[in-house]
Amino acid sequence: MTTIGILTSGGDCPGLNAVIRGAVLKGDTVYGQQFVGFLDGWRGLVEGEAIPLDRSRVRGLSHEGGTILGTSRFGPFQGPNGGADNIARTLERLDVDAVVAIGGEGTAAAAQRLFDEGIKIVGVPKTIDNDLDQTDYTFGFDTAVEIATEAIDRLRTTGNSHKRCMVLEVMGRNAGWIALHSGTAGGAHAILIPEQPESIEQICAWVTSVRDRGRSPMVVVAEGFTLPDMTAAHSTKGLDGFDRPRLGGIAELLAPMIQERTGIETRATVLGHIQRGGVPTAFDRVLATRLGMAVTDLVARQRWGHMVALHGTEIVEVGFDEALVDHKSVPDHRYREMRIIFG
Ligand code: F6P
């Protein structure tokens, strides 16, 4: 009988619990696999801290946000018990045969290295940012877009009442997917994304033309957006657990610039972690469940070093190495398509 240890690593994401449920239910039903969950991401694997996961533990989980296993930005090579050799010994001690790592780019990179060093590991891609290559969508993204779109709808009514320009900052790290999709769905008058710097003059021209039509301008900005004279995305909060700059605050920077140049009273809202919390959308529950079920096939077929992914409407497998070659940015044509109707 194969025992699989599941972990969720990196920023949490609506749909993680649906993956865990999908894996446990199919693994048990089809392959007779057993499951444990490592707590708080790689930390649980490194420290050997695991809980049993059986059918009763995952019952009714698909609509629950967050992750029942906890997560962290702790890396598997960190600390005195980290590294592939130690982890192999820990897996043996716990009688765990294979690892399923659910995570984003940092998790896939760490999983690839562990695989190279002999660990039997497969993965499930997750991130609200939707920036992982080799998968058309990641679960969590649709939920984040829904929440951001609702925020735009709400900001629009208060903006209209006061005749203000409203600037909404959304997450996404160095990818503009959440901003592009929510801004499009919410009918924003300008969408600013990391892949496409825009000048403050251009932003103000869009804002002014909206005001001149008697409307209240709505600007959606991704946290990683830069003005042409900025050398890096706005970051004043130090580094995260993977040593990447913590982004955020660009809306607070832009709002006074817009107000000063256009004379339009402007307010900034930073949506923050609200877009990562709460129940997943139906789309994300379905995708997450299918990915969780499919990852049990990878284990049964011993496809170590691979992760499940969405291509079109089909679940497929791709190597961690293939997924790590590129970062999935918003392509130029997708931005140009929407830019035509800004202002
Ligand atoms: O990668 C997901 C994400 O939510 C990014 O969009 C954001 O920049 C980051 O994580 C925030 O991380 P933390 O939860 O550590 O503040």
Image: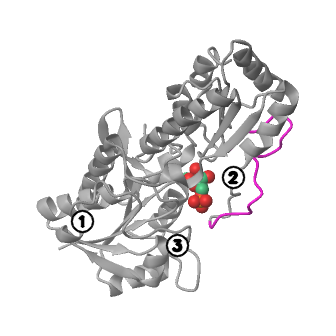
Q: Quadrant of residue 136?
A: top left
Q: Report how far apart the C-alphas of labels 1 and 2 lie in the structure.
A: 34 Å
**Amino acid of disc 2:** Leu
The answer to whether residue 250 is left or right of residue 29 is right
Question: How many other residues sit within 10 Å of disc 1, few (<14), some (14-19) or many (≥20)?
Answer: some
**Quadrant occupied by the C terminus:** top right
To which residue does mark 2 refer? 247
The secondary structure type at the circle numbered 2 is loop
Residue visible at 72% across and 42% down? 251
Instruction: Give percent across and percent down for residue 100.
Output: 36, 64
Q: Which mark is residue 76?
A: 3
The answer to whether residue 36 is left or right of residue 88 is left
**Amino acid of disc 1:** Val
Instruction: Give percent across and percent down for residue 30.
Output: 13, 59
Residue 233 painted magenta = yes
Residue visible at 48% across and 39% down? 145
Q: Which residues are magenta?
A: 224-241
To which residue does mark 1 refer? 58
Label 2 CB, ligand 1: below 8 Å?
A: yes
Name which of mark 1 and mark 2 comes first in the sequence: 1
Question: How many other residues sit within 10 Å of disc 2, few (<14), some (14-19) or many (≥20)?
Answer: many
Name which of mark 2 and mark 3 comes first in the sequence: 3
The secondary structure type at the circle numbered 1 is helix
Is 157 situated above or below 171? above
Label 3 CB, ligand 1: below 8 Å?
A: no
**Are circles 1 and 2 on residues that touch, CB within 8 Å?**
no
Instruction: Give percent across and percent down for residue 101.
Output: 41, 63
Residue visible at 48% across and 72% down? 42
Instruction: Give percent across and percent down for residue 88.
Output: 41, 79
**Are circles 2 and 3 on residues that touch, CB within 8 Å?**
no
Name which of mark 1 and mark 3 comes first in the sequence: 1
**Amino acid of disc 3:** Pro
